[in-house]
Image (tube, rainbow, N blue to C red):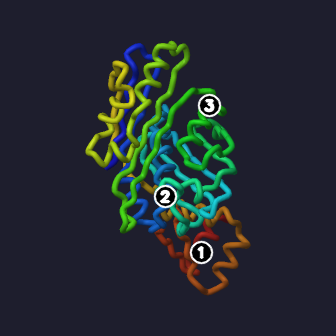
Protein backbone atom coordinates (compact mmCIF):
# COMPACT_ATOMS: atom_id res chain seq x y z
CA UNK A 1 0.00 0.00 0.00
CA UNK A 2 1.14 3.53 -0.68
CA UNK A 3 1.24 6.08 2.12
CA UNK A 4 0.29 9.74 2.05
CA UNK A 5 0.84 12.11 4.98
CA UNK A 6 -0.17 15.72 5.55
CA UNK A 7 1.50 18.21 7.88
CA UNK A 8 0.84 21.87 8.64
CA UNK A 9 3.25 24.45 10.02
CA UNK A 10 2.81 25.40 13.65
CA UNK A 11 1.56 28.86 12.69
CA UNK A 12 -0.95 27.36 10.19
CA UNK A 13 0.44 29.33 7.26
CA UNK A 14 1.69 26.48 5.05
CA UNK A 15 1.22 22.75 4.66
CA UNK A 16 2.85 19.79 2.97
CA UNK A 17 1.48 16.61 1.41
CA UNK A 18 4.03 13.84 1.02
CA UNK A 19 3.47 10.49 -0.68
CA UNK A 20 5.27 7.20 -1.11
CA UNK A 21 3.56 5.86 -4.23
CA UNK A 22 5.97 3.00 -4.92
CA UNK A 23 3.26 0.32 -4.76
CA UNK A 24 0.89 2.36 -6.93
CA UNK A 25 3.47 2.83 -9.69
CA UNK A 26 4.63 -0.78 -9.44
CA UNK A 27 1.06 -1.90 -10.04
CA UNK A 28 0.73 0.47 -12.98
CA UNK A 29 3.95 -0.91 -14.48
CA UNK A 30 2.74 -4.47 -13.97
CA UNK A 31 -0.54 -3.74 -15.77
CA UNK A 32 0.64 -1.57 -18.67
CA UNK A 33 4.26 -2.73 -19.13
CA UNK A 34 5.44 0.66 -20.46
CA UNK A 35 9.00 1.52 -21.42
CA UNK A 36 11.21 2.95 -18.67
CA UNK A 37 10.78 6.62 -19.53
CA UNK A 38 7.00 6.26 -19.81
CA UNK A 39 6.91 4.51 -16.42
CA UNK A 40 8.78 7.48 -14.96
CA UNK A 41 6.45 10.02 -16.58
CA UNK A 42 3.16 8.30 -15.80
CA UNK A 43 4.42 7.45 -12.31
CA UNK A 44 5.06 11.13 -11.64
CA UNK A 45 1.59 12.08 -12.87
CA UNK A 46 -0.03 9.34 -10.77
CA UNK A 47 1.83 10.62 -7.71
CA UNK A 48 0.68 14.18 -8.37
CA UNK A 49 -2.93 13.06 -8.79
CA UNK A 50 -2.76 11.02 -5.58
CA UNK A 51 -1.49 13.99 -3.56
CA UNK A 52 -4.07 16.31 -5.11
CA UNK A 53 -6.76 13.70 -4.42
CA UNK A 54 -6.26 13.74 -0.65
CA UNK A 55 -6.59 17.54 -0.75
CA UNK A 56 -10.22 17.19 -1.87
CA UNK A 57 -12.87 17.70 0.80
CA UNK A 58 -15.71 15.37 -0.20
CA UNK A 59 -15.60 11.61 0.21
CA UNK A 60 -16.87 11.05 -3.34
CA UNK A 61 -14.73 13.78 -4.94
CA UNK A 62 -12.15 12.95 -7.58
CA UNK A 63 -9.46 14.69 -9.61
CA UNK A 64 -8.27 13.93 -13.13
CA UNK A 65 -4.96 15.15 -14.55
CA UNK A 66 -4.59 15.05 -18.33
CA UNK A 67 -1.23 15.94 -19.82
CA UNK A 68 -1.38 16.61 -23.56
CA UNK A 69 2.17 17.27 -24.70
CA UNK A 70 3.81 17.20 -28.10
CA UNK A 71 6.13 14.32 -27.20
CA UNK A 72 6.06 10.78 -28.63
CA UNK A 73 4.19 9.33 -25.62
CA UNK A 74 1.07 11.33 -26.48
CA UNK A 75 -1.56 11.99 -23.83
CA UNK A 76 -1.23 10.93 -20.19
CA UNK A 77 -4.18 10.59 -17.81
CA UNK A 78 -4.14 10.03 -14.05
CA UNK A 79 -7.24 9.90 -11.85
CA UNK A 80 -7.42 9.84 -8.05
CA UNK A 81 -10.19 9.65 -5.49
CA UNK A 82 -10.19 11.58 -2.21
CA UNK A 83 -8.20 8.84 -0.47
CA UNK A 84 -5.35 9.04 -2.96
CA UNK A 85 -6.21 5.81 -4.78
CA UNK A 86 -5.02 6.44 -8.31
CA UNK A 87 -5.21 4.91 -11.77
CA UNK A 88 -3.84 6.01 -15.11
CA UNK A 89 -2.89 5.26 -18.68
CA UNK A 90 -0.89 6.68 -21.55
CA UNK A 91 -1.59 6.89 -25.25
CA UNK A 92 1.73 5.39 -26.39
CA UNK A 93 3.27 3.23 -23.69
CA UNK A 94 6.44 2.24 -25.52
CA UNK A 95 8.79 5.15 -26.18
CA UNK A 96 12.51 4.59 -26.66
CA UNK A 97 14.59 7.77 -26.58
CA UNK A 98 18.17 8.51 -25.42
CA UNK A 99 18.92 9.52 -21.82
CA UNK A 100 19.02 13.26 -21.14
CA UNK A 101 22.21 15.29 -20.72
CA UNK A 102 22.37 14.25 -17.04
CA UNK A 103 22.30 10.57 -17.93
CA UNK A 104 18.76 10.12 -16.64
CA UNK A 105 15.45 9.12 -18.21
CA UNK A 106 14.32 11.95 -20.48
CA UNK A 107 10.80 12.49 -19.16
CA UNK A 108 10.31 15.83 -20.88
CA UNK A 109 11.50 14.25 -24.11
CA UNK A 110 8.69 11.70 -23.84
CA UNK A 111 6.05 14.18 -22.66
CA UNK A 112 7.03 17.15 -24.79
CA UNK A 113 7.74 20.73 -23.84
CA UNK A 114 4.62 22.32 -25.26
CA UNK A 115 0.97 21.51 -24.83
CA UNK A 116 -1.44 21.68 -21.91
CA UNK A 117 -2.09 20.28 -18.46
CA UNK A 118 -5.80 19.90 -17.72
CA UNK A 119 -6.99 19.44 -14.14
CA UNK A 120 -10.61 18.36 -13.70
CA UNK A 121 -12.08 18.22 -10.21
CA UNK A 122 -15.41 16.46 -9.70
CA UNK A 123 -16.55 17.85 -6.37
CA UNK A 124 -20.28 17.13 -6.54
CA UNK A 125 -21.32 20.22 -8.47
CA UNK A 126 -23.43 20.16 -11.63
CA UNK A 127 -20.30 20.65 -13.72
CA UNK A 128 -16.71 19.70 -12.81
CA UNK A 129 -14.11 22.39 -12.21
CA UNK A 130 -11.62 22.45 -15.09
CA UNK A 131 -8.33 24.32 -14.97
CA UNK A 132 -5.97 24.52 -17.95
CA UNK A 133 -2.37 25.69 -18.04
CA UNK A 134 0.41 25.41 -20.58
CA UNK A 135 3.16 22.86 -20.13
CA UNK A 136 6.23 24.77 -18.94
CA UNK A 137 8.84 22.02 -18.80
CA UNK A 138 7.40 18.56 -19.46
CA UNK A 139 9.06 17.32 -16.26
CA UNK A 140 5.58 17.29 -14.64
CA UNK A 141 6.50 18.61 -11.17
CA UNK A 142 7.17 22.07 -12.57
CA UNK A 143 3.98 21.84 -14.61
CA UNK A 144 1.93 21.03 -11.49
CA UNK A 145 3.58 23.93 -9.64
CA UNK A 146 2.70 26.23 -12.54
CA UNK A 147 -0.89 24.97 -12.57
CA UNK A 148 -1.42 25.90 -8.93
CA UNK A 149 0.21 29.32 -9.42
CA UNK A 150 -1.73 30.23 -12.56
CA UNK A 151 -5.06 28.43 -12.25
CA UNK A 152 -5.61 28.42 -8.48
CA UNK A 153 -3.38 31.38 -7.52
CA UNK A 154 -1.74 29.24 -4.83
CA UNK A 155 2.05 29.49 -4.40
CA UNK A 156 3.34 25.91 -4.36
CA UNK A 157 6.40 23.74 -4.62
CA UNK A 158 6.05 20.27 -6.13
CA UNK A 159 8.70 17.55 -6.30
CA UNK A 160 8.16 14.17 -7.96
CA UNK A 161 10.36 11.19 -8.67
CA UNK A 162 10.28 7.65 -10.02
CA UNK A 163 13.34 5.38 -9.99
CA UNK A 164 13.14 2.60 -12.57
CA UNK A 165 15.33 -0.49 -12.30
CA UNK A 166 17.33 -1.83 -15.28
CA UNK A 167 14.78 -4.65 -15.64
CA UNK A 168 12.04 -1.98 -16.00
CA UNK A 169 10.50 -2.68 -12.58
CA UNK A 170 9.96 0.23 -10.19
CA UNK A 171 12.49 0.74 -7.41
CA UNK A 172 10.64 3.60 -5.71
CA UNK A 173 8.27 6.46 -6.41
CA UNK A 174 6.91 9.44 -4.51
CA UNK A 175 6.70 13.17 -4.14
CA UNK A 176 5.76 16.13 -2.01
CA UNK A 177 3.68 19.25 -2.47
CA UNK A 178 4.10 22.34 -0.32
CA UNK A 179 1.52 25.12 -0.43
CA UNK A 180 1.38 28.55 1.17
CA UNK A 181 -1.91 29.56 2.73
CA UNK A 182 -3.29 33.14 2.58
CA UNK A 183 -1.36 35.48 4.86
CA UNK A 184 1.73 33.30 5.01
CA UNK A 185 4.46 35.50 6.59
CA UNK A 186 7.72 36.19 4.80
CA UNK A 187 9.75 34.45 7.51
CA UNK A 188 7.89 31.20 6.81
CA UNK A 189 8.56 31.57 3.10
CA UNK A 190 12.25 32.14 3.82
CA UNK A 191 12.35 29.09 6.11
CA UNK A 192 10.80 26.92 3.39
CA UNK A 193 13.30 28.18 0.83
CA UNK A 194 16.18 27.45 3.20
CA UNK A 195 14.82 23.96 3.92
CA UNK A 196 14.73 23.16 0.21
CA UNK A 197 18.14 24.59 -0.69
CA UNK A 198 20.05 21.33 -0.44
CA UNK A 199 17.29 18.74 -0.26
CA UNK A 200 18.10 15.46 -2.05
CA UNK A 201 15.84 14.21 -4.82
CA UNK A 202 12.69 12.35 -3.85
CA UNK A 203 14.08 9.07 -5.20
CA UNK A 204 17.36 9.54 -3.31
CA UNK A 205 15.44 9.97 -0.07
CA UNK A 206 13.11 7.03 -0.69
CA UNK A 207 15.85 4.66 -1.83
CA UNK A 208 17.85 5.53 1.30
CA UNK A 209 14.96 4.24 3.41
CA UNK A 210 13.21 7.50 4.30
CA UNK A 211 9.44 7.29 4.80
CA UNK A 212 6.81 9.79 3.70
CA UNK A 213 6.89 11.24 7.23
CA UNK A 214 10.68 11.55 7.11
CA UNK A 215 10.56 13.37 3.78
CA UNK A 216 7.86 15.79 4.97
CA UNK A 217 9.96 16.68 8.02
CA UNK A 218 13.09 17.03 5.87
CA UNK A 219 11.35 19.26 3.33
CA UNK A 220 10.26 21.64 6.12
CA UNK A 221 13.20 21.10 8.46
CA UNK A 222 13.49 24.80 9.32
CA UNK A 223 9.92 24.89 10.66
CA UNK A 224 7.92 23.22 13.39
CA UNK A 225 5.16 21.14 11.82
CA UNK A 226 2.20 19.17 13.13
CA UNK A 227 0.77 16.06 11.51
CA UNK A 228 -2.77 16.42 10.21
CA UNK A 229 -3.47 12.91 8.96
CA UNK A 230 -2.24 9.97 6.95
CA UNK A 231 -3.86 7.53 4.57
CA UNK A 232 -3.01 4.37 2.68
CA UNK A 233 -3.55 4.33 -1.05
CA UNK A 234 -3.31 1.90 -3.93
CA UNK A 235 -3.65 1.60 -7.68
CA UNK A 236 -7.40 1.16 -7.93
CA UNK A 237 -9.58 0.92 -11.01
CA UNK A 238 -13.32 1.39 -10.53
CA UNK A 239 -14.45 -0.19 -13.79
CA UNK A 240 -17.32 -2.71 -13.73
CA UNK A 241 -19.52 -4.60 -16.15
CA UNK A 242 -22.45 -2.34 -15.23
CA UNK A 243 -20.44 0.76 -16.18
CA UNK A 244 -19.39 -0.79 -19.47
CA UNK A 245 -23.00 -1.74 -20.20
CA UNK A 246 -24.05 1.87 -19.56
CA UNK A 247 -21.32 3.07 -21.90
CA UNK A 248 -22.46 0.70 -24.64
CA UNK A 249 -26.08 1.78 -24.22
CA UNK A 250 -24.97 5.42 -24.53
CA UNK A 251 -23.69 4.69 -28.06
CA UNK A 252 -27.30 4.43 -29.24
CA UNK A 253 -29.73 1.81 -30.57
CA UNK A 254 -28.30 1.82 -34.10
CA UNK A 255 -24.81 1.13 -32.86
CA UNK A 256 -26.02 -1.68 -30.60
CA UNK A 257 -27.96 -3.26 -33.48
CA UNK A 258 -24.80 -3.26 -35.60
CA UNK A 259 -22.95 -5.08 -32.81
CA UNK A 260 -25.72 -7.66 -32.41
CA UNK A 261 -26.13 -8.22 -36.16
CA UNK A 262 -22.40 -8.81 -36.63
CA UNK A 263 -22.78 -12.22 -35.00
CA UNK A 264 -19.49 -11.73 -33.17
CA UNK A 265 -18.65 -10.98 -29.56
CA UNK A 266 -18.12 -7.33 -28.65
CA UNK A 267 -15.01 -6.79 -26.54
CA UNK A 268 -14.44 -3.66 -24.46
CA UNK A 269 -11.07 -3.12 -22.79
CA UNK A 270 -10.59 -0.83 -19.78
CA UNK A 271 -7.76 1.63 -20.43
CA UNK A 272 -6.84 1.78 -16.75
CA UNK A 273 -6.57 -1.91 -15.80
CA UNK A 274 -6.59 -3.68 -19.19
CA UNK A 275 -9.52 -5.85 -18.12
CA UNK A 276 -11.57 -7.05 -21.09
CA UNK A 277 -15.38 -7.25 -20.91
CA UNK A 278 -16.95 -9.57 -23.47
CA UNK A 279 -20.55 -9.27 -24.69
CA UNK A 280 -22.15 -11.91 -26.90
CA UNK A 281 -24.71 -10.93 -29.57
CA UNK A 282 -27.44 -12.05 -27.13
CA UNK A 283 -25.94 -9.83 -24.42
CA UNK A 284 -26.11 -6.89 -26.81
CA UNK A 285 -29.74 -7.71 -27.67
CA UNK A 286 -30.53 -7.64 -23.95
CA UNK A 287 -28.92 -4.18 -23.73
CA UNK A 288 -31.12 -3.05 -26.62
CA UNK A 289 -34.19 -4.19 -24.68
CA UNK A 290 -32.96 -2.32 -21.60
CA UNK A 291 -32.50 0.88 -23.57
CA UNK A 292 -35.95 0.86 -25.19
Contact, mark 1 vs mark 2 (Cβ under 8 Å): no
Q: Residues within 10 Å of mark 3 (few under 14, many from 20)?
A: some
Residue occupied by mark 1: 284
Q: Position of residue 94 (x, y in %)?
A: 53, 69
Q: Which mark is residue 149?
A: 3
Pick the residue in front: 208 or 151. 208
Pick the residue in front: 84 or 166. 166
Say what secondary structure mark 2 lies in. loop
Q: In percent of the image, x 54 and y 80: which residue is there?
A: 280
Work out which residue is located at the far left of the displayed protein and give it. Answer: 209
Residue occupied by mark 2: 105
- Earlier in the chain: of badge 1 and badge 2, it is 2
| Closer to the eye: label 3 or 2 | 2
Say what secondary structure mark 1 lies in. helix
Say what secondary structure mark 3 lies in. helix
Q: In percent of the image, x 42 and y 33: which residue is there?
A: 17
Q: Position of residue 118 (x, y in %)?
A: 64, 45
Q: Quadrant of residue 197?
A: top left
Q: Residues within 10 Å of mark 1 (few under 14, many from 20)?
A: many
- Earlier in the chain: of badge 3 and badge 2, it is 2
Amino acid sequence: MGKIVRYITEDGSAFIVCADTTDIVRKMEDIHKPSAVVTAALGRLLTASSMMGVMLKGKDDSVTLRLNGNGPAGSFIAVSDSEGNARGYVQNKIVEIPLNDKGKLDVKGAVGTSGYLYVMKDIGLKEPFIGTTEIVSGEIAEDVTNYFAVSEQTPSVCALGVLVNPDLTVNCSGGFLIQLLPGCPEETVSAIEKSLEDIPSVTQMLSSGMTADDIAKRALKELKIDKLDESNSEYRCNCSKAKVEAALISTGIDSLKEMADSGEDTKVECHFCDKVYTFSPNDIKNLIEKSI
